Amino acid sequence: MNQRPALRFQKKPRSRHGFLVFCFVSLLAAFTVLRLVLLLQFGPPSAAPWNVLLAFAAGFYRDVIAALWFMLPLLFWCFIVGNRPFASLIHRLGFRFFMTLLWAVQVFLLAAEFYFFAEFKSRFNPVAVDYLIYPREVFINIWDAYPVPAVIAGCLFIGAVWMWMAGRWFKTMWTKAVWIGTRFLWFAGALILFAGLTQTIHLTPPHVSEDRTLNEIANNGAISFFAAAWTRNLDYPTFYKTLPRDEAYARVHRLLASTNATFVGDNFSVERKVSGDPNRPRLNVVILLEESLGSEFWGCLGRTNTLTPEMDRLATQEGLLFDNIYASGNRTVRGMEGALSSFPPLPGDAIVHRDRSENVETIARVLKRDSYNTMFLYGGHAMFDNMKPFLVANGYDQIVDEKDFPNPSFANVWGVADEDLYAGAIREFRALSQTNKPFFATILSVSNHKPYTYPQGRIPENPNGTRDNVVKYTDWCLGQFFKAAKQEAFWTNTIFVVVADHGARVYGSQDIPIFSYEIPFVILGPAVAQQPQRLHATGCSLDLPPTILGLIGRPYETLFLGRDLLHDPPDTFHALLNHNRDIGMFAHDRMVVLGLQKAVEFYAGNPHAVNLELTPQPVPEDLELEKNAEAIFQVADELYMNRRYHLDP
């Protein structure tokens, strides 16, 4: 008699919907395990237990929405497939195979999200979206940097184990008949629930604490990826705080005011003429845009065990060294739009990617109007990140990329090694200097990038796939470049600029982790740096073009939104920053961050000394900084969207 209840329980058939519930719960468990791993591995050590609990609660809510989204196709399939076809052998085999692959892919995405978080301290963000557009470089880079075969094998094994377990527990689901009305109610109910829940969340990560990393941990990777893709071309005035148009332009005019510049347009223009001596020589200009070479590696910028001895020596003994400069963002295209176009890092895509960038002002355009030859040199494929179309359309006469280095000493997926790039640059500059025309060139390096490989024998450290060693190699290559350049005739009449496109990695608790945005900015060459000098002006990537043009000293017209750090009023200096969909302005040890849904946050502190702390009650200086930030980003968006950020016909 005692065996009858157990027997009845064992014989009770389980339906296809029980299987789907098990799948749904498994997804929630997987998302929760990943969140726990991220917290233990990357979470802030001093996070309050209440904030951690909030992170898991908010994260679970988002996980439910993401899991429902994953389940909808399966629910739809189980709705349209009748009882007899569902029970057929071919359907059973196909369904088992599909679910095994589905779970293998899901586990792979969870593993990818972990590695992505390790690199960017963020759930999937715009970087992940951009990487999907260029699968060749990204896939080979991942293959070289991570144990991909082992990860794939492990994912397939986990998928097979999950399906085996689920198949044993729900072996009766194939023959359990389910009325079509019931199947429809399951699908429709899940669809309605999903549609309702999606209306309750924002595209920004949950705000469970004042720590950005913990907020990212509380997010869900699928939702953050969707948000990044959805907001690539967002409507700026809809999502961000703005000012009345006349007030915005008036503020930007004050921010761009200079003793040697005159506004020449109407009240809704930033066009101005910068005075200079037309008889001054047209000095050559070379910008070395260094991949990920943030200030954290430089001994002259604070590191005790320096990784950049060559550049430390050049910067402190021969150059103008700016020690308070910040990258505009954490992508190369952000560095390019700032350092080449002096354009603020709007939320959404960088203008290098956008669809209205066929006529954008750049320093190459300015110098080309002054009869310069212009060239861009890159060790990889210039089409990557839409660089070549942007550059060709905006002032660059010649593009030199990987195909133009036929026998490099070393190359990986990102391109030829820096030493080959710089040796080729010396040859190109030698030829340009013999044309009796000045030249402007930009060199974008590639070596300081995963998988961190370089030729053996250049530095004492053997290549082993670590960032510190490849930074030493990058520095060695720069030292070799300047040794070679000093032997050339063009050395004496060329301005050389070394600047990082962005920092090496993102870390910090602020919505915009400004400490990790610190970058070097060094100007070399006897034509402008007769003696070494250390300069403390606050600036960012946008300030390169005005500062370089100020050193040349010739008159020019401009729309640039950066400052000349050597000649403009110091009280107008600031840094404009971007992180994911947050934008900000930093000046005088204060930072304002503008976010989606017209959010605003304030921070205070010296990022060189302490972490910036959130300011709960803004003071008048904060509110003034907020209006300045709103003005300059609003004006930049209007100029770009209306194709008014250019001077050429």
Image (spheres, helix red, strand yellow):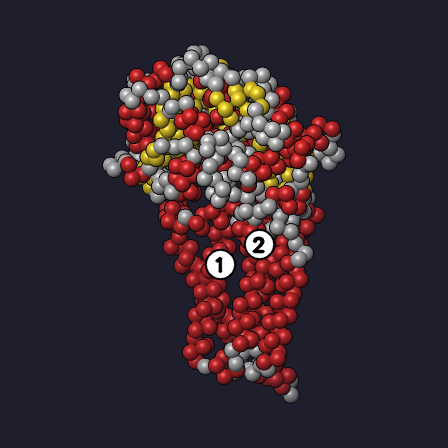
Q: Are marks 1 and 2 in contact (CB under 8 Å)?
A: no
Mark 1 neighbour class, 10 Å CA radius: few under 14, some 14 to 19, many 20 or more: many
Residue 231, position in %: x, y?
A: 56, 48
The residue at the point 61 percent across, 50 percent down is 203
Reading the image, the residue beneath label 2 is 223
Q: Residue at x 29, y 30 (%)?
A: 424
User: What residue occupies the far left of the structure in this picture?
Assistant: 407
Name the quadrant containing residue 435: top left
329 left or right of 364 in image: right
**Which residue is under mark 1?**
107
State the SS at label 2.
helix
Q: Which of these two is toward me, 528 or 591?
A: 528
Residue 177 screen position, x and y as percent = 56, 83
Q: Measured along the vertical axis of the image, is residue 305 above or below residue 55?
A: above
Q: Earlier in the sequence, mark 1 or mark 2?
A: 1
Instruction: Say whether residue 617 is left or right of residue 185.
Output: right
Q: Is residue 646 above or below residue 496?
A: below
* Residues packed near mark 2 inside 10 Å, few (<14), some (14 to 19) or many (20 plus): many
Would you identify the image quadrant in which residue 465 lies?
A: top left
SS state under label 1: helix
Q: Residue at x 58, y 16 (%)?
A: 259
Q: Looking at the picture, how far across and down is residue 369, in whole percent?
A: 42, 26
Residue 465 visible: no
Spot the residue most to the bottom. Answer: 1
Q: Amino acid at mark 1?
A: Val
Q: For the residue marked with disc 2, what is the amino acid?
A: Ile
In the picture shown, does residue 34 fall above or below 5?
A: above
